[in-house]
Image (cartoon, helix red, strand yellow):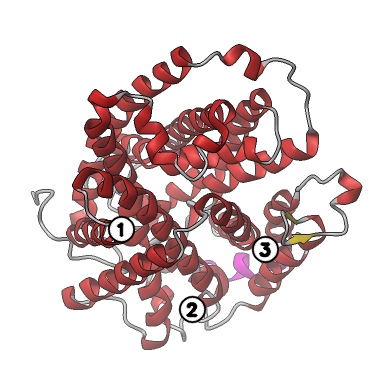
Amino acid sequence: MAGPLQVERRSIDPIPDGERHGNPRSLFTLWFAGNMQITSAVTGALTVLVGLHPLWALVAIALGNAIGGIPMALHAAQGPKLGIPQMIQSRAQFGVYGAVLPLVLVVLMYLGYFASGNVLGGQALAAITGLPVDASILLYAALSALIAIVGYRLIHRFGWLASLVSVVVFVYLTFRLVTTHDLGPVLANAELDLPAFLLALSLTASWQLTFGPYVADTSRYLPASTSIRATFWWTYGGTALGATWAMSFGALAYAVAGKEFKGHEVTYVVGLGGEALVLPLLLAIALGKFTINVLNIYGGYMTVATTLTAFTRRAVLSQGARVGYIAFVGVLGGVLAVLGRGDFLSNFVLFLHFLLYFLTPWSAINLVDFYFLRKENYDLDAMYDPDGRYGRWCVPALVAYFFGIVVQIPFSNVDKVFTGFMVPLLGGADIAWLLGLVVPGAIYWAAMRNRIRENRPVAGGG
């Protein structure tokens, strides 16, 4: 059996049954580690930064991750059944060329998250090594690319290690936060500001929803016999628990520290441990951030390849091409991190909003197609052929997607950038993402249910 250091050969092509391996339990540790890290804590801080009382922020964090984790984990269950990257499967809904539209947005998502991860990981690496921050950011990006080149097995093995380290570190940091600060006054007099609560809910739900485009990439090697229930619950448990814990820590840290935390997240977290533990905590922060950073570049290269190969009809990448795509995403993400690292927290909240409005409709259409219309039944060969069953364009899917974006605009509230006309009537609340989940899925189901029933492929297709 291949070891974790053997370089992965597969990319955007289907995984043959003979190469399937693993247990869905590994998804728990991978996604727990992917969420128990410094960017999750920053996202938790945003829930207090928007003006919500810290106690209600903790409620919004738990509820947002519980809700957003459901579609995220449902996407994960698609991996074992189809054995292909998540965004290749989108061609069955949008058409081989039509899928390029959401693909481009997903590429932006990967670059944004990869760049933000490089900023925080690079800060920790700079503190450890004494290198300039910009050089540390680029080095961190290069190390992430190296793990992505080795691929799937090493990523899962690394996730197990990072999960163990994350538990130890966050238990200690949480203990230090609680015992070195008086949280009683911070959590007292908890008045509910409903608009701020809904905004915080959308921020935390968006964290989970934006995992949708690549979560199946990490489950596609599992045996096809793996049950949807097992894949769902192991993924859901890891992602919801890890994110809720880390975000709650960030919300409380910001509530008690304010400006000491904002803009100095790594320094503040390390400071909680005292001088004796500065180096171990910096190493733990760099390691914890590394898991999700690798997943971002790993999924990012496959999404870029999926976009470009729609027009070349290629289903298999050579090793050279695979490494080239990873290097391209790594270099671009590293440069963006260096250029955009100023005022990181404010830029990150705008980025989360942008992603939520554009990716939620894609998620709804994809899940409705998989679970309610085609019911796990796809022709894999046709996903690589513009002249095949799924065609070049699927107009109903594109209409549903565009309408899913448009219907959110009146209810969107992006601080200092855009406020929809319905937002003041709702007291400033942002409920756009709920409409982005429900409306496009319903439109797509109504438009496609008869067409898919009449043209359903044989199970396993190809």
Could you tell me residue 197's position as x and y percent? 72, 35
373 and 288: which is toward the camera: 288
Is 105 left or right of 380, judged from the image as shown?
A: right
Quarter of the figure with residue 140 = bottom left
Tell me which amino acid carries mark 2.
Val
Question: Where is 324 relative to 204, above or below?
Answer: below
Label 3, residues with CA under 10 Å away: few <14, some 14-19, many ≥20: some
Label 2, residues with CA under 10 Å away: few <14, some 14-19, many ≥20: many
> If you read the primary sequence from the N terminus, does the residue marked by circle 3 or circle 1 appear first?
1
**Which stretch is magenta?**
446-457
Is 87 left or right of 335, judged from the image as shown?
A: right
Q: Is residue 193 visible?
A: yes
Label 1, residues with CA under 10 Å away: few <14, some 14-19, many ≥20: many
Residue position marked by numbered label 2 in the rendering: 96
Q: Nearer the viewer, mark 3 or mark 2?
A: 2
Judge whether residue 451 is colored magenta: yes
Residue position marked by numbered label 1 in the rendering: 137
Image mark for residue 126: none
- Disc 3 from disc 2: Cα separation: 20 Å
Residue position marked by numbered label 3 in the rendering: 449
Question: Where is 349 relative to 273, above or below?
Answer: below
Check contact, mark 2 vs mark 1: CB within 8 A: no
Q: Nearer the viewer, mark 2 or mark 1?
A: 1
Could you tell me residue 248's position as x and y percent? 53, 28
